[in-house]
Image: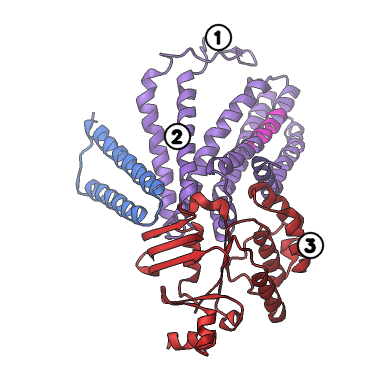
Chain colours: A blue, B red, C purple
Amino acid sequence: MTVFRLGGFELLWVSLAFAWLTYAGYRLWTGTASPTARFLSLGLILLIAMGLLQDLLDFSRG
Amino acid sequence: MMLARLSSVTKRYGKAEGVRELSLELYAGQAVGLLGLNGSGKTTTLKLLAGMLSPSQGHVEVLGRPPRESRGQIAYLSDADSLYAWMTPADAERFMAGLYPDFSPSRYRELLAFLEVPKQGYRAMSRGQRARLRLAMVLAREARLFLLDEPLSGIDLISRDRILRSLVREWREEACLVLSTHEVGEAEGIFERVLLLKEGRLVLDTKAEELRAKGQSVRDAFIEVLA
Amino acid sequence: MSAFGTLLWLEFRKQGTFAMGMLMVVAGWSLLLRQFFAWGAEPSIVALAVVASTLMLAGAVVTAYLLWLGLDFAREYRNGRWALLLGAPQPGWLHLSARLLFACGVLTLFAAGMWGTLAFWLGRVGLEWPLGLGLALWAYGLGGVALVVPVLFIGLLVAAYLPARADLLAFLVGLLGLGQLLEWSLRLFSAQFYRWLPPWGLPLPRLGEMAWEGFPGLPSEAFVLLVLLCVLLFSAMSRLWQEVEV
């Protein structure tokens, strides 16, 4: 079975995705005075990041 | 009796500041004119008092609690053209009576008659008629703090003066009225206290009688401060 | 009239036209399905065409309704009506319950209408639709809650970020995040399905000659999980309602 490898192209996409998540986290944390909205959006962003990491792990295990 | 207090309140929208280091106390029985040019922070101040905005710094309290917890005591009229297009005055009565426990239907009907609001739907009303209906909805409440943001815009000059004079003359002892306007002349001889905002700061907080004692009109004070 | 009754009335007046449109779709579709039979093909092919096109139409209409519902918070904000709603001394959960109840009612009525159409026309070619009406209503009702709660959640989250003009960002994060929440919940709980609670016994479904004899029922754990997620999202929304800026 072929094993997924992190090449330059994949690394670029993954970095872009994490950079976007960081930007979204900053905008959504600073964009409201509501503590609930802040923590909800932060929680959702963490979930997305965890999902992305999990997918990377699953792929690299083949 | 003090009804509301802003203590060193700053409200930022991103990098811009709506109001800066604003401190203010409002008392029962007062009719207060909140004046300022466009963008001076009048709407932000009223929204902070109504709990529609949270301060970036400082504290706001109404009847000793955060405004959102005192919503039952605050009657706020926004400057937006904010009613459902299908609503008739009768629908508006049903809406208000269901959602606001302090709404008085009999007072509402009196106000509709006094303000000459037609019975048709909101969509079919002129700008002035819409403003009158929204004003009646808010004034029919038995709240303690009335925050009216440019409530008379769109209403003809003669009616504006009549409405404003009657409103202030019959003002209730237990409640406070804060009415914002950019028409300085409107405040002349009507409000007992005048607040003037400039670039988000409170630059004048005076009683009308103090101005009169100095031989100044509200317009004079306004121009002096802005200059 | 009570506050909840007023809020339901408000939803009825706001959504009345859209909801009536959905019921008209059911009536129109029922008449259109006659054409499938005029086609004169094999009954099994007609049945397949009837089921596929009905499901597609129902999916499209439900999606349109959910989009309308999700965008309603932003519409209220843009039209300056938030102040009227937030100014009322009613708790957030009451406003949201009225929206939820009304939307689930509309979806269930629509689904039941489509079910009736499908069952009637399949009956014409001697086939029986495998889900009974009672079960269908129950499943559609729960499915409705599971669809409406996340839609309201994302709609309110987006509205909370309208003043900062980060609404598109909030929408993407809400959508991806909720998808991820569902995926993680399934990952964590899928091992437990059929383990703790008994499966929900369904009346044995039949499709023509086929009988699903070995079908144990639906996993109760999945429904419990669904309900838990909905309660969680609903309480988060109720808090958010109290803090939204206008």
Marks 1/3: CA distance?
A: 63 Å
Pointers 1 and 2 in contact (C-beta within 8 Å): no
Query: Which mark identifies residue C232?
Result: 2
**Does C141 sit above or below residue C27?**
above
Nearest the viewer among C74 and B190 is B190
Pointers 1 and 3 in contact (C-beta within 8 Å): no
Amino acid type at image mark 3: Gln
Q: Chain of mark 3?
A: B
**Does B35 sit above or below residue C69?**
below
Picture quadrant of residue B226: bottom left
Please name which of the two marks, 1 or 3, marks the residue nearer to the observer.
Answer: 3
Picture quadrant of residue C93: top right
Residue topped by disc 3: B120
Amino acid type at image mark 2: Leu
Residue topped by disc 1: C213
- Which residue range is magenta in the image? C107-116
Amino acid type at image mark 1: Glu
